[in-house]
Image (spheres, rainbow, N blue to C red):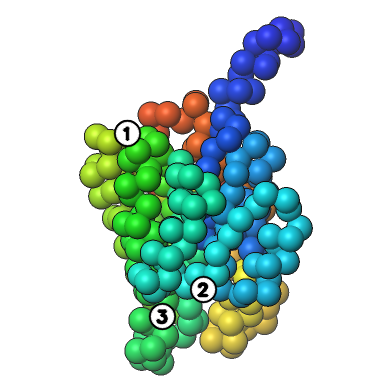
Amino acid sequence: MAAPDGAAAALGALLQPAPGLRVLVTGGTSGIGLAVVTALESFGARVHVCGTDADRLAAHLDAVPGRTGSRCDVSSPDEVAAMVADVERDLGGLDVLVNNAGIAGPTARVEDITTEEWRRTIDIDLNGAFFCAQATAPMLKASNGSIVNISSVAGRLGYALRSPYNAAKFGLAGLTESLARELGPDGVRVNAVLPGFVDSDRLNRTTQARADAMGLSFAEVEGILMAKTSLRTKVSEQEVALLVAYLLSPAARTISGQSLSICGNVEYL
């Protein structure tokens, strides 16, 4: 029997973010970041977007009235500080930080990875999340807000040929738990979302790079990836975005310090 209309409405309100949330999404002009921006705006959030490509950012801001943004390389503390000042000016405070900005890094054996490649991956994927959390913490404490770190199943499983990315994502798991403990007494929740093989241009690029490194075809490597996943399926960017939205809902008010996989159960990498 279907639930009464009132019960259905109450359940819907419990499972989605409250309208009017002030949200900063880093790396929000493409991929998972853009899916998160779009989903949260559909629930009535006011979103400030950051990206490194000024032209792409401008196009996204022009496309949606009221959407604000900043050009920012999150690996730079000075640029992060300037972006957070923009957020405070444009939104008047902050309720949610979504740390999404990241790069895939090199696909290569450890002896072939350059120092520059290692440092750049760690700088963006791990240091950037720290700098953004550090700069927004006062506003999030004031609003009893929330941080969602977009990580990866590579944050819980070893990943051959992807050591810089793997190390950054394991670091992000530790950062998530540490910040949850530190900021929890101030009413701030901190969680991480761990997507599996996301059906995206990035996955296609990294799959091809892995195929090249292993001397295999794209189809062969893709088959290997799917064989590692219990449900034998990829994850969509929209599914990841909806998990983020759930973590910002009243139903998730006591979820903190968690790394939640959305991956079809990736068994190993």
* Residue 114 point in image, percent of width and height: 39, 91
- Check disc 2 and report the residue beneath it: 104
* Left or right of residue 253, residue 207 in this image: right
Q: Is residue 45 placed above or below 33 in the rendered structure?
A: above
Q: Nearer the viewer, residue 250 or 141?
A: 141
* Residue 213 point in image, percent of width and height: 54, 86
Disc on res. 187? 1
Residue type, mark 1 in image: Gly
Disc on res. 120? 3
Label 2 and label 1: CA atoms lie apart by: 33 Å
**Residue at the (32%, 47%) spot, across then down:** 138
| Mark in the foreground, 3 or 2 | 3
Circle nearer the N terminus (2, 1)? 2
**Residue at the (60%, 40%) spot, across then down:** 45
Q: Is residue 148 visible?
A: no
Label 3 and label 2: CA atoms lie apart by: 10 Å
Quarter of the image where the N terminus is located: top right
Image quadrant assignment for residue 255: top left
**Residue at the (49%, 26%) spot, across then down:** 251
Disc on res. 141? none
